[in-house]
């Protein structure tokens, strides 16, 4: 039983004793901390949440984003940067369905690029004094070999079909 505040105040005036029924009515008029307040009883909540996202739609959106993140990206993109040490031959394997367009060199060194371990520089070389780019067009290879005469970072620029 819900009793309005003015009635409750009349029952609890100085030197008056509320009856057991009045006391219980007073207790039943309020939410106890252990009770959950029903959403329908919160004034204005429907208006506030009217444009809110439901748990189901948020879950569906999250699942869709995960599918897209795991899907192979297509088009021109930078691959992961490779750190080269001086005079160490390093192999770079292109992602599946990718073609090499260019490499970007960050640092000071000459970088030689080849498609085999034995023919160093047969695809070209680039001298970098900070940043330089060596372009290949659409080079359709599975992997390349890189060697620099100094420590540099190389970022392959690829096209994923």
Image (spheres, rainbow, N blue to C red):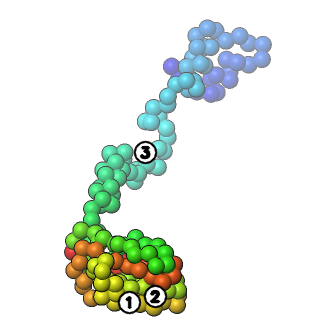
Vertical position of residue 65 compared to residue 36: above or below:
below
Q: Residue at x 51, y 82 (%)?
A: 150
Q: Residue furthest front?
A: 118
Q: Which mark is residue 125?
A: 1
* Residue identified by numbered label 3: 46
Q: Residue at x 38, y 85 (%)?
A: 112
Q: Between residue 47 and residue 9, name the one nearer to us.
A: 47
Q: Residue at x 47, y 44 (%)?
A: 45
Indicate which disc, 2 or 1, sits on the residue closer to the N terminus: 2
Q: Residue at x 47, y 73 (%)?
A: 83
Indicate which disc, 1 or 3, sits on the residue closer to the N terminus: 3
Q: Position of residue 82 (x, y in %)?
A: 43, 73
Q: Position of residue 52 (x, y in %)?
A: 41, 51
Q: Between residue 132 and residue 113, name the one nearer to us.
A: 113
| 1 to the left or right of 123 | right
Front disc: 1 or 3: 1
């Amino acid at each position: 039983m819900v009793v309005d505040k003015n009635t409750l105040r009349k029952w609890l005036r100085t030197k008056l004793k509320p009856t057991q029924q009045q006391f219980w009515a007073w207790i039943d008029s309020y939410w106890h901390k252990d009770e959950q307040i029903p959403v329908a009883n919160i004034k204005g909540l429907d208006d506030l949440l009217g444009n809110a996202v439901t748990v189901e739609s948020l879950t569906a959106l999250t699942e869709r984003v995960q599918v897209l993140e795991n899907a192979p990206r297509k088009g021109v993109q930078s691959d992961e940067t490779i750190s080269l040490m001086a005079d160490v031959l390093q192999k770079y394997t292109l992602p599946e369905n990718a073609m090499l367009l260019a490499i970007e060199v960050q640092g000071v060194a000459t970088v030689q690029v080849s498609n085999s371990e034995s023919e160093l520089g047969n695809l070209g070389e680039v001298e970098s004094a900070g940043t330089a780019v060596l372009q290949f067009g659409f080079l359709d290879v599975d992997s390349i070999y890189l060697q620099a005469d100094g420590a540099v970072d190389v970022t392959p620029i690829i096209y994923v079909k």
